[in-house]
Amino acid sequence: MDGIDPTVPPSGTGCVDCDAASPQGWWYHLRRCAQCGHIGCCDTSPSQHATAHNAATGHPVIRSFEPGETWFWNYTTQEKHDDGPILVAPISKPAGQPAPAPADRLPADWEDHLHR
């Protein structure tokens, strides 16, 4: 697939944009840009930063950054791919990181803020 650089490490262990926001946000699941390593939150998350990153940069492919998930999504073709190249580690968020996260930023009614 075009738009994948397997040598680029992820930008961190959480959504870069949620962490940089003021006030800081939270995420449900994480996605990794396969071209630049940007970690953004999924479309179920309130801020949908992974898709916003695609819109801002044109980087076409993301990979799940959840433990045990290896699928890729191509925004250009709107296709899911169950496999692809092995990306440089780490390949997922830390196994102990909950979903949603971070726990100290979650509102009491966090489920009401999810996009379904």
Image (cartoon, rainbow, N blue to C red):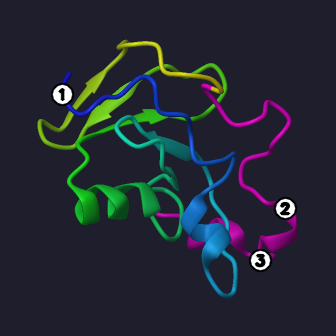
Q: Which residue matches tag 3?
A: 107
Query: Mainly helix, strand or loop, the magenta region?
Result: loop
Q: Could you give the CA–CA distance between mark 2 and mark 3, rounded to whole angstroms?
A: 9 Å
Q: Is residue 102 left or right of residue 57?
A: right
Q: Which residue matches tag 2?
A: 103
Q: Could you give the CA–CA distance between mark 2 and mark 1, rounded to whole angstroms?
A: 36 Å
Mark 1 and mark 3 residues within 8 Å of each other at the beta carbon: no
Q: Is residue 82 left or right of residue 1?
A: right
Q: Could you give the CA–CA distance between mark 1 and mark 3, rounded to whole angstroms?
A: 39 Å
**Quadrant of residue 2 within the rendered picture:** top left
Residue occupying image coordinates x 63% and y 74%: 20
Residue occupying image coordinates x 61% and y 69%: 18
Amino acid, disc 3: Pro
Residue 111 position (above or below residue 42): below
Magenta span has 99? Answer: yes
Residue 26 position (above or below residue 84): below
Q: Which mark is residue 2?
A: 1
- Where is residue 14 shown, x and y percent of the image? 67, 52
**Quadrant of residue 91 within the rendered picture:** top right
Decide which of tag 2 and tag 1 comes sooner along the chain: 1
- Circle 2 residues within 10 Å: few <14, some 14–19, many ≥20: few
Residue 113 position (above or below residue 70): below
Q: Which residues are magenta?
A: 91-116
Residue occupying image coordinates x 71% and y 54%: 100
Amino acid, disc 2: Ala
